[in-house]
């Protein structure tokens, strides 16, 4: 992303993240300010210091307090939902970025609208998101170290979340030796959990096209084509969709 955007001296708003060290955001990238908004929730100071040492002395603010800090300090972290971004943040940022977030967003229409409103004219919204639902590991399930989306050749199987109905997947998991408890949790994460939105490439493109942005460039960040037999089954099951290869997208959207 850094090769596509000049961050130097720019005011940056990040949707869905808060853990990039300032040595990178302010130091390497040269941003003048970096404001991060994420649904952090309630975390202890000990957890914050242990997991993200560079944030141990950084206060996490709500929207009201965060609005008072716009442009006044290098790093501001806000606990909030980006789809509820208040007007105090509109028109203050040169760049809005989002990493590994949009695949989790249920209200993409409002998410894109808030990104557009936060930008100044001529601003850029840059994203990298995935794995997306139609990809080989697009389900994001993580039940255990042996049963998770990072192991596509495990019991769930490559594109298994798309090819099997929930009862069929349950049978596969139990036959493979997964416990009833873990199998039930896997089914919930695969098919009903609100942690992901289950949109296809064509859906994302449609949402961006319908947004207020003048234009959006899509570039595949990584892809893994399905074998011919699996692709044939996927096309039969999902005749409205064609892309089962792209795992993540990098996008650039422009505000006039």
Image (cartoon, grey):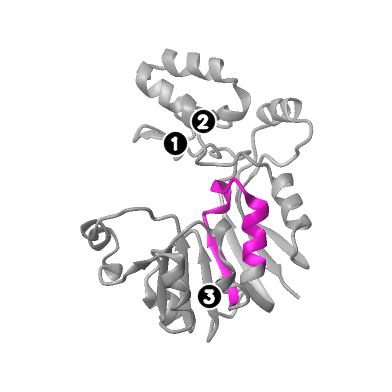
What SS does tag 2 mark?
helix
Residue 29 seen anywhere in this rendered image of the structure: no
Q: Quadrant of residue 221?
A: bottom right
Instruction: Give yes or no for residue 240 being in the magenta stretch.
Output: no
Query: Residue at label 2?
Result: 190
Circle 3 packing at 10 Å, graded few (<14), some (14-19), many (20+), is many
Q: Is there a contact, CB below 8 Å, between mark 2 and mark 3?
A: no
Q: Which mark is residue 12?
A: 3
Name above or below for residue 162 compared with residue 63. Answer: above
User: What's the residue at 77%, 57% (across, down)?
Assistant: 209
Circle 2 packing at 10 Å, graded few (<14), some (14-19), many (20+), is many
| 187 with respect to 115 (left or right) | left
Depth check: 130 or 53 in front?
53
Circle 1 packing at 10 Å, graded few (<14), some (14-19), many (20+), is some
Sooner in the amino-acid sequence: mark 2 or mark 1:
1
Q: Position of residue 17 (x, y in %)?
A: 45, 61
| 209 with respect to 62 (left or right) | right
Distance Cα–Cα, label 2 vs label 3: 34 Å
Q: Which mark is in front, 1 or 3?
A: 3
Q: Position of residue 130 (x, y in %)?
A: 56, 49
What SS does tag 1 mark?
loop
Q: Position of residue 242 (x, y in %)?
A: 75, 39
User: What's the residue at 59%, 41% (across, down)?
Assistant: 197
| 180 with respect to 167 (left or right) | left
Magenta residues, start to end: 93-116
Query: Residue at label 1?
Result: 151
Sooner in the amino-acid sequence: mark 1 or mark 3:
3
User: What's the residue at 50%, 41% (across, down)?
Assistant: 195
Q: Which mark is residue 225?
A: none
């Amino acid at each position: 992303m850094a090769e596509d955007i000049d961050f130097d001296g720019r005011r940056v708003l990040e949707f869905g993240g808060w853990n990039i060290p300032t040595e990178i955001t302010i130091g390497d990238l040269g941003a003048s300010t970096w404001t991060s908004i994420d649904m952090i929730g309630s975390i202890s100071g000990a957890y914050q210091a242990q997991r993200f040492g560079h944030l141990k002395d950084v206060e996490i603010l709500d929207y009201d307090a965060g609005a008072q800090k716009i442009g006044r300090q290098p790093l501001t972290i806000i606990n909030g939902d980006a789809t509820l971004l208040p007007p105090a943040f509109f028109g203050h940022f040169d760049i809005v970025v989002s990493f590994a977030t949009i695949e989790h967003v249920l209200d993409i229409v409002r998410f894109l609208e808030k990104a557009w409103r936060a930008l100044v004219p001529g601003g850029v919204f840059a994203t990298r998101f995935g794995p997306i639902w139609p990809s080989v590991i697009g389900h994001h399930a993580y039940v255990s170290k042996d049963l998770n989306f990072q192991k596509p050749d495990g019991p769930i199987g490559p594109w298994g979340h798309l090819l099997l109905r929930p009862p069929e997947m349950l049978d596969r998991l139990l036959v493979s030796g997964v416990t009833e408890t873990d199998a039930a949790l896997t089914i919930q994460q695969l098919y009903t959990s609100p942690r992901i939105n289950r949109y296809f490439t064509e859906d994302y493109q449609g949402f961006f096209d319908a947004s207020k942005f003048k234009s959006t460039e899509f570039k595949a960040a990584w892809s893994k084509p399905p074998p011919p037999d699996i692709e044939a089954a996927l096309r039969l099951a999902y005749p409205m969709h064609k892309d089962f290869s792209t795992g993540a997208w990098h996008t650039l959207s422009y505000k006039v």
